[in-house]
Image (cartoon, helix red, strand yellow):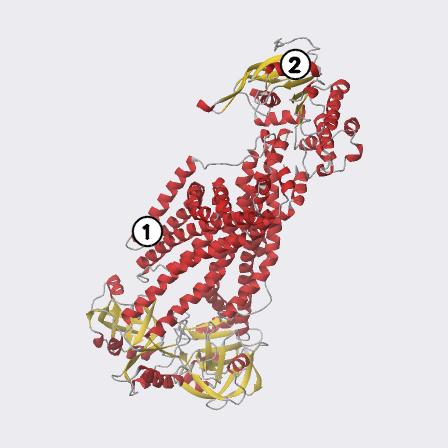
Amino acid sequence: MTTTPTATSTDVRTRLAAQAVEATKVYGSGPTAVMALDAVTVGFEAGRFTAIMGPSGSGKSTLMHCVAGLDTVTEGRVLLGDVDLGTLSDRDLTLLRRDRVGFVFQAFNLVPTLTAEENITLPDRLAGRRTDPDRLAEVVETMGLGDRLAHRPSELSGGQQQRVAVARALVRRPDIVFADEPTGNLDSRAGAEILQLLRRAVDELGQTVVMVTHDPRAAAVADSVVFLADGRIVGRDDGPTTASILERTSSLGG
Amino acid sequence: MLFLTLREMRAHARRLAGTSLAVVLGVAFLTGTLVLGSTLRRNFDDLFAGAVAGQDVVVRSETLMEMDSPRGLIDLSLVERVEAVDGVAHAEPEVSGLGQLLGADGEPIGGMGPPQLAGSWTEDPELNPYRLAEGRAPERSGEAVVDRNTLERGDLALGDTTTLLTPEPFEVTIVGVATFGDEDGMAGVTYTGLTLEDAMAQVTGSPDGVSSIAVRAEEGVSPEELAERLDAALPDGVEAVTGEALADEQMDEIADTFLDMMLAMLTTFAGIALLVATFSIYNTFSILVAQRTRQVALLRAIGAGRGQVLRTVVIEALVVGLVAAAVGLVGGLGVAALLTALFDLAGFALPTGGMVVTASTVVAGLVVGVVTTLVAAAAPAVRATRVAPLAALRDAEVERTSPSRARAVVGGAVLAAGVGLTLAAATSEGGNVAVAGLGAVLTVVSAVVLGPVVARRAVAVLGAPVARLRGVPGGLARENAMRNPRRTAATASALMVGVAVVTLFTVFASSLEASLEDTLDRSLASDLVVNDGAWGGGGFSPGLADELATLDEVEVATGLGTGEVRIDDDVKSVSVAEPAELARVADLGVTAGSLTDVGDGRIAVAEDTASSHGWAVGDTVEVTFVDGRTEELAVAATYEVDDLTGGYLLPRSVWERHALQPTDRMVLVDVADGVDLDEAEAAVTEVADRFGGPNVEDREEFTATMTAGVDMMIGVVYALLALAVVIALMGIANTLSLAVHERVRELGLLRAVGTTRAQVRSAVRWESVVLAVFGAAGGVALGVFLGWALVETVSAATGNLGSFALPTGTLAVVLVAGALAGALASVRPARRAARLDVLTAIASP
């Protein structure tokens, strides 16, 4: 099935945390132009865990970048909440990323010269604010980082580093958390841990998480999976299991 | 962001320290120069103040050429008039002039820089800056007091007899040893004090004239007041100045003729060093910023604004600049000591004393250090703000940046303007130095701007032999140097500027030497030249030429001296000789009249000078001499070749009527027919030794002596430029280090697939060599062009320095040296690259 939720839903419970409307992204120009996104329209519901899946070159990362305000669309619109990202200046985009969005990348998430705690509180310090100590304690406990706060990233395992990254993403209660292949560099146990933490963030803390992944087992943790191929939405699974995802991806081809 | 910045800096302290070294050196040089300047100024000040201590007022003649010539004399009888003035406690006449004291070896003591003085020994101890330490004051003719320093240098002692040349030889016996206040002497000045009668007879040669009258004021009378009263009582042409004013005057003189020029020169070289340092810092910061791209991108992704990123880099630059400047300030003290030692080595004795560090020096050093670093880091800082947040998600890419079109166009335009202006100025009639200078600056700027544009092609060409001969490592070296033309050009630019300046001076010096040789070749026709060296001492007595002329071995011996007169109220240099005799040993290219006609009451004038004044043979010129008297001299000849004699040639008879101590600087000797040159030389030397031992040389030796002076000057220039070149090379080493750090993964890969450690080292080394040769070649090309322009402009403007000589040998050496230096700069980075652990390297982020 290829249903696309409407861009203007008035249902409070299924409010969209972010959406793309006829979003098109073209790299380069002339004969060497590459169309990474082709008039994609998709919404990400608030308070839910959405995964974006697709083979390499499908545009899944590009879609996330655009929706997250890290990249701009060539045509169409991207909205975070009610804000049209295309109307924002670089400064406003920066502030938006700082205050309302959380990021977890696949690698190189942390500043090597800062401790875990300093990395977590970095966005607040950039804003010139002190992190609420209660909130910090809450997030640290949820991530299980209590005894690692004073360590530098070089002294942490891959899994611990990602947990710090997730903590940083969550500590300011963002409207939405974007994760780009967060388990890509981790072994299966550490990866599973991270996915569980993200799951808990949605279930217990009411966060919205949008995750790009190529791993079916990771996507199975999500509430919904959006499938991309060749820059277009080619499917959606609102009750994903590993099996159902595998079936979908094999039918899509590599 | 501040805490992050500081944390980052602490983590990368070593890397930043390497960067800052360039600024440290530049600031140290500048501060050293400033400290040297303040110290010298203070020391000279103290010296002159000491020299006039106790002399409340000095009465002297008003007539003056410039400080090179002594003042006119005043009448001895004025002493009575002075003593009669109310408020005068004591007045004593003084004679002072040039006098060379011969040491135990028969050579004049001293001479390089500080004057060699002789005069009357002032009896009133309060009016005499010198104090009698041993022995007694001179009482009879032939007795002398000499300062202790001079005695030591000349290996003389109390009771010895030696000769004083004023410039006539005069035998003296040392009866007293003096100190200058508490010092053994007045900073290198040699002083011989005679009785007043002796001084009047020997030094000034006048029976009733003295140089000055020193006056001590009574209690309660201020020097200024006394000076006024004396002025009123004195006749026209004689003035009274306070001791303080005299000291100030001497201070100004030293400042104008020596201090300011020396400091300007040193500051210029410090400026060059700092310019090179700017390149170095720019490059390093560019690399540092590039290396932190991913981190900057991450920060931008999580919400750091552009301004915050900019501030990070600026703060880093600020801290680096401040620390470097502070260290440089301290280093500057060492540099000042070094510079003083350098001058001592070259023979110029400077007055010594503790170092003077003024507040303005400290401020200047700090400001310059900080500003240099900030300016250099500005462009990289702005570049950092342009890092897109997306870069955090991408792998580090190979920067295959191509320089923009705009750069090529703008650079080309500036180059055209610069070269055009320089050519126009150099080939124009009068030679416009200002325009040529502007053109030169534009050319240099365009060379820097166009660097990245030509880098790729230039390196491809320069690296081709390396790639062919050195296999894979050579090919890698060439590729690496080509891959980031902007960085390659920035690194090489620093060396280019340094080499360009070195080449500029080398070309200029070789042209100077060539012109000098041409001149001497053209104008000098004598077999032997008796002279006192390239820097000239005080000259020697004209009696030498007279005596040489009587020798059997000598056909012609004629002397050539110099002096100053006023013509049209301008001070002019004149040469003094027997023009008829001179014509026999030198070819002056007479254009009108004849040199044999230039006798008493006549003058010969150079063609250029004559035409600019509108004089022809037969016209009269009004000349005022140092004694205040004026004569009308008829132009009896004009000549073309003015290198030897300058614009004006006076017959000896005219000059000796007015001059106080006529001296010759050269004697041109033609050997008699049939006499062996060596024999003649020996005979001449024997006579010359009795007159203070000036050099006796044949034409070749004489030319060599003259050009040796240029060589020495160039040596000093090279020493001063060495710093700039060192900074440039450090920049190359730095860049390579950082580049190796950047390419760790790539190097690991190479090693993994079978490149040996030696090959990796070789690749890094050859990359450095190619870079260095690129910079050096550019510098040589630029330097040759600018040197040519300088020579042409100067020769057009002054009429001297005709020929342009390209010292190809030296330039080849410069290129080779550049290549070697490049190899040297690469040693540490190459070793580090070769030592990488393969697995760690590949796994690097």
Chain of the residue displaying label 2 = A
Chain of the residue displaying label 1 = B
Residue A130: % across, % down = 73, 31
* In the foreground, B15 or B393: B393
Q: Is residue B667 above or below residue A140?
A: below
Q: In front: mark 2 or mark 1?
A: 2
Location of residue B394 by image quarter: top right
| Disc 2 packing (10 Å; few <14; some 14–19; many ≥20) | few
Q: Is residue A127 above or below residue B13?
A: above
Quarter holding the C terminus of chain B? Answer: top right
Residue A60: % across, % down = 60, 20
- Are the residues under badges 2 and 1 in a single subunit? no
- What kind of residue is marked 1? Ala
- What kind of residue is marked 2? Glu
Dot 2: what SS?
Answer: helix
Quarter holding the N terminus of chain B? Answer: top right
| Disc 1 packing (10 Å; few <14; some 14–19; many ≥20) | many
Question: Which residue is outermost to the front?
Answer: B754
Residue B712: % across, % down = 44, 67
Q: Relative to residue A149, is residue A70 drawn left or right?
A: left
* C-alpha span from label 2 to label 1: 82 Å
- Does any portion of residue B459 appear in the rendered image? yes
The residue under label 2 is: A247
The residue under label 1 is: B425
Dot 1: what SS?
Answer: helix
